[in-house]
Amino acid sequence: MTLPASPYVVLGLIAKKPGSGYDTAAFADRSVRYFWPISRTQVYSELPRLEELGWITGTLVPQDRYPDKRVYQPTPTGLRALRDWLDVPAPRQRIQDVVLRTFFGAYMSSQRLAEQLAEYRQQAEKLRAELLAIVEHLDAKGLDHSRVLTQATARYGVLQAEATIAWTTETQALLEPPQGQAG
């Protein structure tokens, strides 16, 4: 079964912090929203699908001052589905995909996460080299107004690639066991 990322994102949020739809949407706003576009409506619409798949279970919790709410938690099947999804790199490796998988990285092996980070770092290094070649080519031709703007956009890509390289390097170091300890 092929699903878009949004059900897995909601499943991952519930795995990290079980709660109601409101709680999950609020958690998304405080966490993944900064690097993954997901709306409250998406969170709420994924909950019935996840429950139907058997990936989460909901329990009705009565409340005195408010309407009763449904509180969700992942099932073992759901956690397996999340791990399986995390183990396979996103088809179009974008920084958001890698950051998302890192955010939910506790549900995959450190080795697999490190492999995905290394693959993404290699892509960023290749992109940086390609863009630097464009910048150098434009420098050699002389910069008119149009080339200055083209060079500026290429430099943006270079800086983005360098930030990705730095972030993946830093994150990979966090996955390594401290000196003197076996992982």
Image: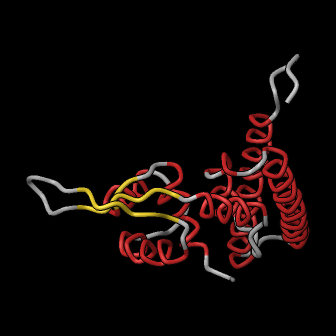
Q: Position of residue 123 (x, y in %)?
A: 86, 63
Residue toward you, 104 or 39: 104
Is 72 positioned to the left or the right of 130 in the image? left
Seen at 75% across and 38% down, the residue is 170
Quick one: 61 or 135, which is closer to the camera? 61
Residue sticking out furthest to the bottom:
1
Question: Quick check: 135 above or below 63?
Answer: below
- Which residue in the rendered view is the most extreme toward the left? 65
Horizontal side of residue 44 vs 100, given as left or right: left
Tell me which corner region of the image, top left, top right, bottom left or bottom right, holds residue 25.
Answer: bottom left
Taking 3 as reference, is 10 above or below it? above
Residue 34 in picture, x, y percent from top left:
49, 57
For residue 128, say whether it is visible: yes
Residue at far top of view: 180
On the rendered image, what quadrant is the C terminus found in? top right
The mark total stands at 0
Please say if 61 is above or below 38. Answer: above
Left or right side of 127 for 86 = left
Q: Going 73% across and 51% down the picture, which residue do you hit?
A: 108
Q: Is residue 156 visible?
A: no
Please name the residue shown 15% across and 63% down the image.
67
Residue 140 image point, x, y percent? 91, 68
Colour style of the rendered protein structure: secondary structure
